[in-house]
């Protein structure tokens, strides 16, 4: 029941209620029909017994009138009725005794009673009022069905705005912030819609403020860092020069990482996948690294892969950079095995679980030299690519292995 939608639940309840009403009507109708038939048989049996056992051989007209009035009977011509009975008649009841016999026939919706006592024949018609019980039951059942249908349609109309709201929420979940939820009314659905509309506008304002802040701060930092970097090249003391250049390059790298994070974490970001060779992807990653090729190696068959080349290259760049930076021998080995890309480096096992390091700016004491954004970018990009990211450690070889599983 938890996984059934509200609309499906209403459909189910309506169908079940309709089935219950139909079965109840059918059972009640059959029971009423059987009871009515039984009552008629008892009635005609009683009339037959009364007529046969109490009637004189030659009844007077006044006696006949009393009998007719008592049982709502009417005398009709015998010969004419016999022809009708022969054509369309159906025997309902028959009774006899030493005094005579009585037979009841059904012709269309009429009931004819034939009485014969010592050759005294009578053809009577039952003039009892028509029993409208069946019609009453049918009318009540029809009223209930119509009422149920009206309630069903009213419920569907009432929850129809929920479907529209759900579609707009799905659009918002895919990154479409240009939606306006306009729902008139003051019921619970209207209040939810208005609250959600306020939340969307607030989130849009926050995102806009964040983007403006990020762009401004990156722009404002880029210029002085670049200027300082140029000025650092003029320093004559080589040790101081290297320290300044390294610091300014790292600051510049941080700004570039922040720009990448802003881009890949946007809801509107969509990977541009195509068919590429592994050699193309690794070449792109090398161009981003700006490190000596002696510090890393590739082992792979140059097969084709369907992916976003730039994004996967960015992932590899960050993993290789981390492996070189934090590995004991400052080397990284990249191996392709089937649908996996393994980035290996020597060193101690990670002290925390992988999820700890994929949070932005999270790092332990041994990673104090880094900014803590590398694995966050890796995790975010791989999530956009629908790839899995795993970590394992081989104790015997003291080897950290980061795995990218491509599906």
Image (tube, rainbow, N blue to C red):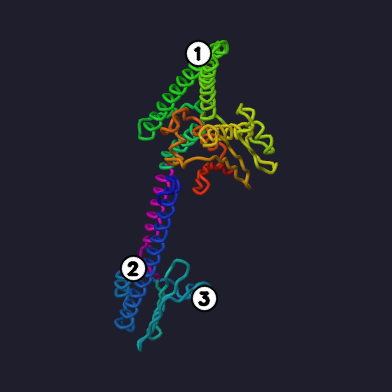
Label ID, residue 220: 1
Mark 3 and mark 1 residues within 8 Å of each other at the beta carbon: no
Q: Residues within 10 Å of mark 1 (few under 14, many from 20)?
A: few
> In this rendering, would 111 be left or right of 332?
left
Residue under numbered circle 3: 86
Helix, strand or loop at disc 1? helix
Please report the bounds of the magenta region as a residue range. 125-153
Q: Residue 405, position in %: x, y?
A: 57, 44
Q: Which residue is at the front of the view, 347 or 207?
A: 347
Helix, strand or loop at disc 3? helix
* Residue under the image location 61 percent in, 40 percent down: 334
**Residue 140 on the magenta segment:** yes
* Residue under the image location 36 percent in, 68 percent down: 36
Q: Residues within 10 Å of mark 3 (few under 14, many from 20)?
A: few
Q: Which residue is at the front of the view, 237 or 127?
A: 237
Q: Residue 164, position in %: x, y?
A: 47, 35
Q: Residue 223, position in %: x, y?
A: 54, 12
**Is residue 134 depicted above or below 269 in this figure?**
below
> In this rendering, would 284 be left or right of 3?
right
Q: Earlier in the sequence, mark 2 or mark 1?
A: 2
**Is residue 186 depicted above or below 234 in this figure?**
below
Mark 3 and mark 2 residues within 8 Å of each other at the beta carbon: no
Residue under numbered circle 2: 72
**Residue 202 on the magenta segment:** no
């Amino acid at each position: 029941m938890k996984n059934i939608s509200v609309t499906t639940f209403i459909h189910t309840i309506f169908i079940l209620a309709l089935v219950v009403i139909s079965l109840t009507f059918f059972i009640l109708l059959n029971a009423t029909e059987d009871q009515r038939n039984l009552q008629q048989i008892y009635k005609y049996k009683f009339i037959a017994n009364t007529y046969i056992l109490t009637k004189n051989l030659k009844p007077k007209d006044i006696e006949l009138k009393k009998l007719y009035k008592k049982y709502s009977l009417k005398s009709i011509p015998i010969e004419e009725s016999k022809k009708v009975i022969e054509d369309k008649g159906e025997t309902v009841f028959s009774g006899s005794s030493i005094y005579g016999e009585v037979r009841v026939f059904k012709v269309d919706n009429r009931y004819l009673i034939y009485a014969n006592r010592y050759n005294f024949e009578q053809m009577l018609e039952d003039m009892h009022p028509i029993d409208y019980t069946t019609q009453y039951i049918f009318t009540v059942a029809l009223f209930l069905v119509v009422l149920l249908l009206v309630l069903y349609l009213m419920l569907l109309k009432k929850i129809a705005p929920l479907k529209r709201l759900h579609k707009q929420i799905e659009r918002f979940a895919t990154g479409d912030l240009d939606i306006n939820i306009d729902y008139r009314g003051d019921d619970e659905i209207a209040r939810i819609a208005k609250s959600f509309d306020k939340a969307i506008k607030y989130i849009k304002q926050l995102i806009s403020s964040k983007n403006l802040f990020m762009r401004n701060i990156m722009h404002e930092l880029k210029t002085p860092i670049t200027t300082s970097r140029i000025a650092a090249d003029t320093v004559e003391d080589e040790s101081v020069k290297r320290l300044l250049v390294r610091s300014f390059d790292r600051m510049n790298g941080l700004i570039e990482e922040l720009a990448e994070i802003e881009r890949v974490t946007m809801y509107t970001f969509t990977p541009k996948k195509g068919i590429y060779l592994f050699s193309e992807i690794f070449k792109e990653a090398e161009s981003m690294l700006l490190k000596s090729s002696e510090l890393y190696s590739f082992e792979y068959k140059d097969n084709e892969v369907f992916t976003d080349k730039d994004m996967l290259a960015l992932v590899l760049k960050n993993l290789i950079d981390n492996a070189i930076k934090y590995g004991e021998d400052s080397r990284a080995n990249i191996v392709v095995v089937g649908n996996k890309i393994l980035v290996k480096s020597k060193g101690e096992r990670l002290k925390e679980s992988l999820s700890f390091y994929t949070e932005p700016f999270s790092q332990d004491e041994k990673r104090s030299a880094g900014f803590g954004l590398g694995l966050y970018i890796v995790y975010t990009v791989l999530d956009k690519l629908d790839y899995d990211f795993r970590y394992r450690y081989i104790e015997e070889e003291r080897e950290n292995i980061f795995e990218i599983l491509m599906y």
